[in-house]
């Protein structure tokens, strides 16, 4: 690692520009803002923890779910991508047995490495995610020592771009860089993040968010085996297709809707259990369709049946979207993407919380997309749903009108124009 002053000088002198252009998918004239952001992280590290002889820099991106909405936790297929907003960190070992992570605008998290047990009173807190990720590294024999880190995020919390997964991947990438010589694979880091979220944070989730953030680029993932998911990189050149990716903040925060999310895997598993299976991926679709009447009678839960219908449809749709992109048929991809969104709205029913029927910010956002795009591009609820964001693929020639139309209803700055980032969890080193 280089000294702080050397690293700052190199950043400001443009010595990291090629790496920054690669990570953030930007041009020559846009690297300065990213370099200054890392300098800010270094200066904030010093203000928080004191002077240091050396420093390491890390980044973990937010993610966009392109296909497969709530299919991952049923061992299904997804299509996802990392995006060019991220959480960055300046970090270094501190020579103690204590981990200290200061995230801007939050209370410092402090962990004694002798205490890696689950703390139920820390459910839903970032410290639980940190402790869980550390525990998985120690489980595989990595000697994790004390370190300090200062993090800065431009991944909006509760936005559907998965700030929690980005944070888990960032912590894993820091530990991997400082103490494992980069030997732990992005796939394993993703699994560590999911473990931390499920077990230490007490939030049921699949593996898609962590995998997209950790692996990076556009990836098709088949979770039939969660221990050994099949991961395939998929090329998508939106510039060539004259489209841009927009993530639209509906203005509603989904951070307090854990119970709503939990009903989705619970409903799907109740259908699987009817057939003696644990996950819907293990259920034969033809047998399911033949037993819809019996399921309704047995479960007394039409929502569970509808959510199972969504799973079978969107699981196939994610595969078809992948094949459309691989064959270069972008129009077919857009058609399938619209179908995926319709299935989420009608069958998965994760567009608004049933406990708050008067609060339908995502529904309004989807209606605006429909009004503005018509039969061009595509749009769909993004991520976990119920609140948060909508994803849209917008033709270049409609972008200005689309963005202004959306923001006239939702407010300035609510339509984010993003790029697919080609790399996931990353340690920024000079070339």
Image (cartoon, helix red, strand yellow):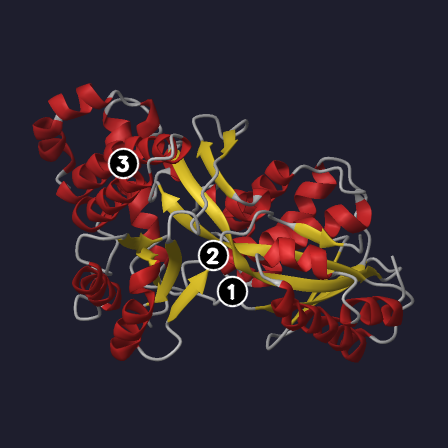
Q: Earlier in the sequence, mark 1 or mark 3?
A: 1
Position in image of residue 105 (x %, y %): 59, 77
On screen, residue 359 versus residue 106, left or right, reads left
The answer to which quarter of the image holds residue 6 is bottom right
Work out whether residue 287 or residue 380 is closer to the camera in this orientation and state it.
Answer: 380
Mark-to-mark CA distance, 1 and 3: 28 Å
Instruction: Answer yes or no: is residue 129 visible.
Output: no
Work out whether residue 50 or residue 370 is closer to the camera in this orientation and state it.
Answer: 370
The answer to which quarter of the image holds residue 392 is bottom left
As drawn, the label of residue 220 is none
Q: Quadrant of the N terminus?
A: bottom right
Q: Residue at x 33, y 40 (%)?
A: 330
SS at badge 1: loop
Q: Which residue is mark 3?
A: 311
Q: Earlier in the sequence, mark 3 or mark 2?
A: 2
Mark-to-mark CA distance, 3 and 2: 21 Å
Position in image of residue 428 (x %, y %): 73, 56
Position in image of residue 214 (x %, y %): 59, 46
Q: Residue at x 14, y 25 (%)?
A: 289
Count of all numbered marks drawn on residues in the image: 3
As drawn, the label of residue 162 is 2
Would you call the spot at circle 3 few (<14 residues within 10 Å), some (14-19), or many (20 or more)?
many
SS at badge 3: helix
Work out whether residue 78 or residue 264 is closer to the camera in this orientation and state it.
Answer: 78
Pointers 3 and 2 in contact (CB under 8 A)?
no
Pointers 1 and 2 in contact (CB under 8 A)?
yes
Circle nearer the viewer, 1 or 3: 1
Quick check: 33 above or below 257? below
Quick check: 394 above or below 296? below
Q: Which residue is mark 1?
A: 155
Q: Residue at x 22, y 70 (%)?
A: 359
């Amino acid at each position: 690692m280089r000294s702080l002053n050397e690293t700052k000088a190199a950043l400001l002198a443009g010595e990291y520009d090629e790496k920054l252009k690669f990570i953030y998918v930007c041009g020559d004239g846009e690297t300065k803002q990213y370099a200054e952001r890392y300098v800010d992280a270094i200066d904030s590290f010093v203000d928080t923890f004191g002077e240091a002889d050396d420093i390491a820099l890390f980044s973990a991106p937010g993610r966009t779910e392109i296909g497969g909405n709530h299919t991952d936790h049923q061992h299904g297929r997804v299509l996802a991508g990392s995006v060019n907003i991220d959480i960055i960190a300046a970090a270094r070992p501190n020579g103690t047995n204590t981990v200290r992570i200061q995230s801007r605008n939050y209370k410092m998290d402090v962990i004694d490495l002798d205490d890696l047990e689950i703390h139920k009173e820390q459910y839903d807190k970032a410290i639980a995610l940190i402790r869980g990720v550390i525990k998985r590294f120690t489980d595989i024999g990595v000697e994790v020592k004390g370190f300090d880190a200062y993090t800065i995020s431009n991944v909006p919390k509760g936005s559907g771009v998965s700030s929690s997964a980005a944070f888990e991947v960032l912590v894993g990438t820091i530990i991997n860089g400082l103490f494992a010589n980069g030997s732990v694979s992005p796939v394993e880091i993703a699994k560590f993040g999911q473990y931390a979220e499920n077990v230490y944070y007490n939030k049921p989730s699949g593996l898609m968010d962590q995998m997209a953030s950790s692996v990076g680029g556009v990836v098709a993932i088949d979770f039939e085996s969660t221990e050994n998911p099949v991961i395939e990189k998929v090329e998508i050149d939106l510039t060539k297709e004259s489209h841009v990716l927009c993530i639209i903040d509906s203005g509603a925060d989904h951070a307090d809707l854990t119970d709503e999310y939990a009903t989705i895997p619970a409903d799907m598993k109740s259908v699987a259990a009817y057939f003696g299976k644990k996950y819907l991926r293990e259920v034969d679709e033809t047998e399911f369709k033949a037993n819809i009447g019996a399921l309704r009678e047995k479960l007394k839960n039409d929502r569970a049946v509808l959510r199972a219908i969504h799973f079978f449809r969107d699981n196939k749709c994610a595969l078809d979207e992948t094949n459309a992109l691989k064959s270069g048929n972008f129009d077919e991809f857009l058609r399938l993407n619209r179908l995926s969104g319709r299935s989420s709205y009608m069958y998965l029913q994760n567009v608004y919380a049933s406990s708050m029927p008067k609060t339908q910010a995502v529904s309004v956002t989807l209606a605006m997309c429909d009004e503005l795009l018509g039969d061009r591009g595509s749009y769909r609820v993004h991520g976990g749903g119920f609140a948060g964001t909508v994803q849209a693929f917008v033709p270049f020639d409609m972008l200005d009108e689309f963005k202004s139309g959306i923001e006239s209803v939702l407010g300035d700055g609510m339509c984010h124009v993003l790029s697919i980032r080609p790399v996931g969890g990353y340690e920024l080193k000079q070339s």
